[in-house]
Image (cartoon, coloured by chain):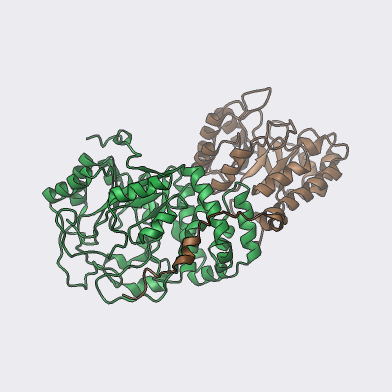
Amino acid sequence: MYTELFDSIPFSEAITRVLSKTKTDVEFALDRSASGRAVGFEDYLALVSPAADSYLEEMANLSRSWTRKRFGNTVSLFMPMYLSNECRSSCVYCGFSFENKIPRRTLSEPEIRQEAGILRRKGIRHLLFLTGEEYSKTNLEYIKNAVRILREFFDSVSMEIYPLDTQGYADLIAEGVEGLVVYQETYDPDAYSSYHLRGMKKNMRYRLEAPDRGGAAGFRRIGLGALLGLANPYGEMFKLGEHASYISKKYWRSTVQISLPRMRPAEGDFHQTLPVSDREFVRFLFALRLFLPDSGIVQSTRESSKMRDHLAGLAVTQLSVESRTDPGGYSGGTELKQFEIEDIRTIPEVFAMLRDKGLDPVFKDFDRGFLVGAES
Amino acid sequence: MQPKSDELVIAGRSFRSRLFLGTGKFSSGQAMEEAIRSSETEVVTVALRRVDLESNSDDILSHIDRKKILLLPNTSGARNAEEAVRLARLARELGAGNWVKLEVTPDPVYLLPDPIETLKAAEILVKDGFIVLPYINADPILCKHLEEAGCATVMPLGSPIGTNQGIRTLANLEIIIEQSRVPVVVDAGLGEPSHAAQAMELGADAVLVNTAIAIAKDPGKIGLAFRLATEAGRISHLYGSGRAAVRKSATASSPLTGFLEEENRNVHGTF
């Protein structure tokens, strides 16, 4: 389990390790990357560190080169679908938090079908479905049923739901779920306990070990991420890099995908104290690309269109589009959003942007024919 | 950049030396002993088919101080999993310990390892309590299978055994080193100290050398040369060699990060 590795270096020490890196360390890392090799973990830390700030352009060039080499000119597009905003956990930064007195809704079968039909007609073939952490309203049977419906519409179905045990994951793989996304939110144990006040999500270790359980169950894709803004970003990047590298080596049949969402406005009165600047943000993405050249890097509509335009193909390989973060949002619009999105462009607009940049927007790169035992 | 302690750890045992020595082909026991001393190796492989474990006066064993050096018996000569497993078990019964360098080489000409039989034997031996170090072709996927089977290292070849051709499997070795969760020992084909240095610079955890030292005019001196080359390669891997100083920065006519200068908007500011 990753927790063994996680425990071996405390979060505070991780921050110190990153901040101890020098320009010489950065130049060494860039040299290794330029020679055609993925950089090692210590090199990655150097690239994450403030010492790399004056090398941003060089990092961008290398990042683009590695992205082209490993992913070609393609950028995958997907859409998220929120099945429910019901949640028993109180996460102070999240609009779905139990404490927030917002209207709650869990989609019924006909509603899931309706939403799926809308997305499919837009040309979407890859879907990510999400829920809050209300296990009784969105229990395993509910999720299985939703997957059966969604598979009628989409080639690839991934999920971002509350953590399950290995058997639960195996059951959903059998139903046809291809990818698992479990963002840790924060890798800082102190911050984690201060932000997650109640509910199952309070159990940090259970969440931390979820990608292991997903890997053991056999997901083809495992998504990891840290929600930047909750804790010291250098500690987050240390632990995220360590985690992603561990997962990719141990569960080597699975593709690792990484996302670095930054905090967005949401319902409630949370005010972050550790924002990440644009320069830092792109440096982190470039460092991840040079460290894990084969990992997909996902960028959501939390970021601006400008940021997304420039980073597509430079480091980012997957984009969500036309996202609604409210259950049933595609069918008629409610006001129950998990957070505010920034890039509100339509699929044709994003498609055209990618084409203009010489990139190839890909809507389908998975086929249900791979899913043995889950044939529809 | 260097870890506090740069020892090699295999199956919980620490080694200061990252040079393993094979014992075949030496002209005499003295020559081998001299090579062991000068190379400062702490792991010596011995072909089980060649040693007489029941005799205290065995030519090879009498030259190895087993208090300081790990004797790593190998199953060379085994043509399939069954033979390798039987050989390892017999050796353990005779006191050779539970470490084994697994070699399954059905091809008598190039002695290339059989990946299927090696994996099969590794699975059996690990379950049987052995610490298994398998000799294999430089196949990254096979390495992952062996790692999952519970092997303590992987030992991919640099080029066919005894050929002294150096590293001909570079692209695959790079992938193996990048992906491995167990130590990677580059084995076979290293004919010059510079080959050992190259393997270590790539990031290998250790190298194994036999022929190049055993048939040298002076095995003691060449053992020393390989030790120094192995150490040099390790240091180079950890610290770089100064190439960074001459690195040319890429300068795009239209900077890729220029958009950050135009507007350093804070998307997440206060809400």
Above or below, comparing residue B188 to residue A339 in the picture: above
Furthest residue in direction front, as rendered: B253
B52 left or right of A218? right
Residue A301's spot in the image, x, y percent?
32, 58
Front-lying residue, B53 or A297: A297
Residue B125's spot in the image, x, y percent?
54, 38
Above or below, comparing residue B240 to residue B88 in the picture: below
Which image quadrant is residue A326 in?
A: bottom left
Residue B143's spot in the image, x, y percent?
54, 40
Which image quadrant is residue A153 in?
A: top left
A171 left or right of B59? left
Which image quadrant is residue B76 in?
A: top right
A370 left or right of A112? right
Residue positioned 18% across, 43% down in the render: A149
Front-lying residue, A47 or B177: A47
Whether residue B1 appears in this view of the structure is no
Above or below, comparing residue B81 to residue B253 in the picture: above
Front-lying residue, A251 or B104: A251
Q: Colour of chain B?
A: brown
Q: Quadrant of the N terminus of chain A?
A: bottom left
Residue positioned 44% across, 43% down in the render: A73
Q: Quadrant of the C terminus of chain A?
A: top left
Q: Colour of chain A?
A: green
Residue positioned 64% across, 39% down in the render: B170
Q: How many marks?
A: 0
Residue A37's spot in the image, x, y percent?
59, 48
Whether residue A143 appears in this view of the structure is yes
Furthest residue in direction right, as rendered: B217
A48 left or right of A363? right
Above or below, comparing residue B8 to residue B210 in the picture: below
